[in-house]
Image (cartoon, rainbow, N blue to C red):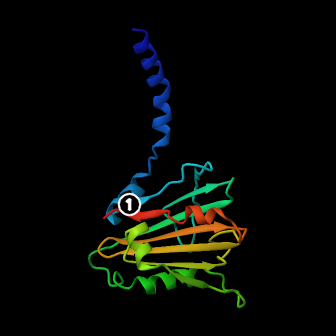
Amino acid sequence: MRFYLYLIIFLLTASPLFLYSQIKYPTELAEELSLADLEIIQPLEARYRTLRLRKNRYLQCDYGIWSRKEKLEIRYAIEPIHPNSRSANIPHVKAFSMATHLATNNEEAVISKLSISPERLAEDFNADYGEVYVFRPKSAFSEKLYCQMLVLYKEGKGMVYVFFLFDDPNNTALDYRFQAVRFLS
């Protein structure tokens, strides 16, 4: 009898922890994730909090999180494939276009592009295409000094942009947060 009493007390005190650890996304975001067959890999440590995204004339992201401890902001923009889309099969053009759209127009600014190996794309992201761009963002997009943009594409599913925004170019949190999304199938 005593065992059952302890078990009931444990379950009553532990269940709120389980409820709070599950992330509930806004309905619109959940629909976008479902349409693109994507999952966000939410950091469980470093006290990431949901970011209240302000209206932005350059790109309105679907979701964002930030951590004061890691000094990192992560924003997500999801583009599910629409059946009549003409640009669905040119992810490399869309990726470059997004990078140049969000990068500062300063003449001395540089945009770096890095490819992701096909093995890593398949293994870590279940994606067909992916690239990483690093640039200084327009101040109207973010007040942070640097942006690392991860772009992933899955044929027939969609495209996702993940923006890692930070001030310190040596921010080691980027290494741990790079795997921020994944296509499910």
- Residue 160: % across, % down: 44, 70
Residue that badge 1 annotates: 33
Residue 132 vertical placement versus 30 (above, below)? below
x 33%, y 59%: residue: 34
Give the structural element (helix, strand or loop) at label 1: helix
Q: Is residue 148 left or right of residue 158?
A: right
Q: Residues within 10 Å of mark 1 (few under 14, many from 20)?
A: many
Q: Is residue 19 left or right of residue 85?
A: right
- Residue 175: % across, % down: 59, 65
In this rendered view, identify the residue nearer to me: 81 or 166.
Answer: 166
Tell me the quadrant of the picture where the N terminus can be found: top left
Q: Is residue 35 left or right of residue 8?
A: left
Tell me the quadrant of the picture where the C terminus can be found: bottom left
Q: Amino acid at mark 1?
A: Leu
Residue 19 vertical placement versus 56 (above, below)? above
Name the residue at the top extreme: 1
- Residue 79: % across, % down: 40, 71
Number of numbered discs: 1
Res 33 → quadrant: bottom left
In this rendered view, identify the residue nearer to me: 168 or 176.
Answer: 176
x 65%, y 77%: residue: 138
Residue 183 vertical placement versus 46 (above, below)? below
Name the residue at the left extreme: 83
- Residue 22: % across, % down: 45, 43
x 41%, y 75%: residue: 119
In this rendered view, identify the residue nearer to me: 58 or 81.
Answer: 81
Res 177 → quadrant: bottom right
x 59%, y 49%: residue: 45
Q: Is residue 133 left or right of residue 104?
A: left
